[in-house]
Amino acid sequence: MFAGSIVAIVTPFRKGRVDERALGDLIEFQIANGTDGIVPCGTTGESATLSHKEHERVVAFSVEAVKRRVPVIAGAGSNCTEEAIALTKHAKSVGADGALLITPYYNKPMQEGLYRHYKAVAESVDLPIVLYNIPSRTSVNMLPSTVARLASVRNIVAIKEGSGSVQQVSEIVQACGDRITVLSGDDPLTLPMMAVGAIGVITVTANIAPADMAAMVDAFASNRLEEARRLHFKMYPLFTGLFYETNPIPVKEALAMMGKIDGELRLPLSPLSTENREKLARVLKDYGLI
């Protein structure tokens, strides 16, 4: 259902408010360059600092702007199950094609709690659900055995796997087979993850290099392995540079350097340091983006 290069799109701000004009332009830039799906209100979209009203508007606006040209998978996760259900219901009501739900953060649920959380959301909203496992953000790792249990729930269709472990991806693929789609949640590991069964990525890098990220995923899917490897190494400096500091600080700075957004962040995120800004600028210049 969901495959290819799917961008975790930034939320541009201007003077403290969501800049819908810039967001619309970013969406057009993505679609024109081969991106296979849009994820608004993910981690890269600074969902943690959006009000509920802003969150709902960004999702609704994204659906309106995309016009069914590619799938929209709305960020709808929370560490409160009832809130995750409410966000997922809203995503369905405005026409999103799916919802991306991060593992509950801070309260550190056990594996049984993770299973019950996702099952409750999936049973409450008839919308395709993408699990999102990223222990570095949430302090909890959803184990392959839990993913396998959840793969039996009808509308849980995919997982964005961001544990940083190709071994864990292998175990998920082995345990679930074709019952669930695996998407990389870690740009530099996308190619290795595809080698063991992932069929795409939810990516930060596509914000600035959408055509190359889409081409890499397509090349691997078409068994053009040398081309996929070439693009992986071409983009590797971007994979590194976009994580000089906490995501999405560098990617918003990169988009600002490219003249696409203001680069404004919301506290507690702070602007990229001078040293890292200079390093990132060199990376973008070498790549031909600025």
Image: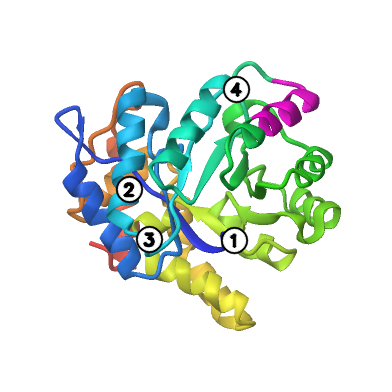
The residue identified by callout 4 is: 81
The question of residue 117 being in magenta is answered with yes
Q: Disc 4 and disc 1: Cα gap in Å?
A: 25 Å
Q: Secondary structure at mark 1?
A: loop
Across and down, in percent, residue 156 comes to 67, 45
Residue 160, placed above or below residue 120: below
Q: Secondary structure at mark 3?
A: loop
Which callout, 3 or 2, points at the residue further toward the start of the chain?
2
Amino acid at pointer 3: Arg
Say the numbered circle drawn on residue 62.
Answer: 2
Q: Disc 3 and disc 1: Cα gap in Å?
A: 14 Å
Q: Disc 3 and disc 2: Cα gap in Å?
A: 10 Å
| Residue at figure coordinates x 81%, y 45% from the top left | 148
Work out whether residue 68 or residue 93 is closer to the camera in this orientation and state it.
Answer: 93
Amino acid at pointer 2: Ser
Residue 282 visible? The answer is: no
Q: Disc 4 and disc 2: Cα gap in Å?
A: 24 Å
The residue identified by callout 1 is: 1
* Direction from residue 252 to residue 165 in the image, left or right: right
The residue identified by callout 3 is: 68
Work out whether residue 124 or residue 196 is closer to the camera in this orientation and state it.
Answer: 124
Which callout, 4 or 1, points at the residue further toward the start of the chain?
1
Amino acid at pointer 4: Thr
Q: Which residues are magenta?
A: 109-120
The quadrant the C terminus occupies is bottom left
